[in-house]
Image: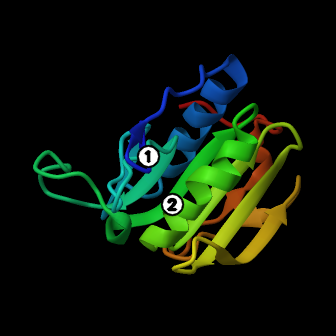
Amino acid sequence: ELIRGEIVRKMPIGNPHAATVKRLNRLFSNPLSTGTLVSIQDPISTEDSEPEPDVAILNFCDDLYASRRPVAQDVLLLIEVADSSLAYDREVKGPIYAEAGVREYWIVNLMNSTVEVYRDPQSDGRFATVTTAVSGAILTPLLLSGLSVPVDEILGLTQTQHD
């Protein structure tokens, strides 16, 4: 992926990481079918970077972003799944997302079984509001009204119905 003008090799994705991305895709695809798109590991354009978040919930675009890459203003929620990439997602990607104006960014921390929630982006690369959700918590994304996402379902700690 393109990070601060340089091509950076992405870390290999392990099975727990891949399974978490699949769970997130399932959790966000069904309830959000109208007016949004779930984008998996596709680039988001910023001033000098094109990071590839694990999951991006985007405003719907008629051509499904075939004519342009999504930008921060298109993003309703960005999610990175982190195991070995935790420091990178916090210290490199987080500031890029904040500088671009991404309004909400989650890091699914597989090492601690938590979800870090970053809100209120600042132009200096920080998020003014940072909270950590633990098992049993329910997350409500700012820009996805009416949606509640159990942390346990993100982490695969509950059995869900399969259609």
Observer-nearest of 146 and 51: 51
Callout 2: 10 Å neighbours few (<14), some, many (20+)?
many
Q: Is residue 133 visible?
A: yes
The front one of 5 and 15 is: 5
Q: Residue at x 88, y 52 (%)?
A: 135
- The image quadrant that residue 117 belongs to is bottom right
Q: Which residue is mark 2?
A: 96
Task: Tell me the residue at 43%/39% (across/down).
Answer: 40
Question: Where residue 28 sits in the image (x, y, percent)?
Answer: 51, 51
Disc number for residue 146? none
For mark 1, give the secondary structure. loop
Label 2: which secondary element: helix
Which residue sits at x=58%, y=71%?
A: 125
Give the residue type at disc 2: Ile
**Mark count:** 2
Displayed quadrant of residue 72? bottom left
Say whether marks 1 and 2 touch (CB < 8 Å): yes
Image position of 73 (left or right of 77): left
Figure check: 29 above or below 159:
below
- Residue 102 visible? The answer is no
Q: Is residue 12 left or right of residue 67?
A: right
Percent from the top left, x then y, of residue 112?
89, 43
Find the distance from the CA under tag 1 to the CA under tag 2.
8 Å
- Does residue 51 sit above or below 157 in this rendering? below
Residue underneath mark 1:
51
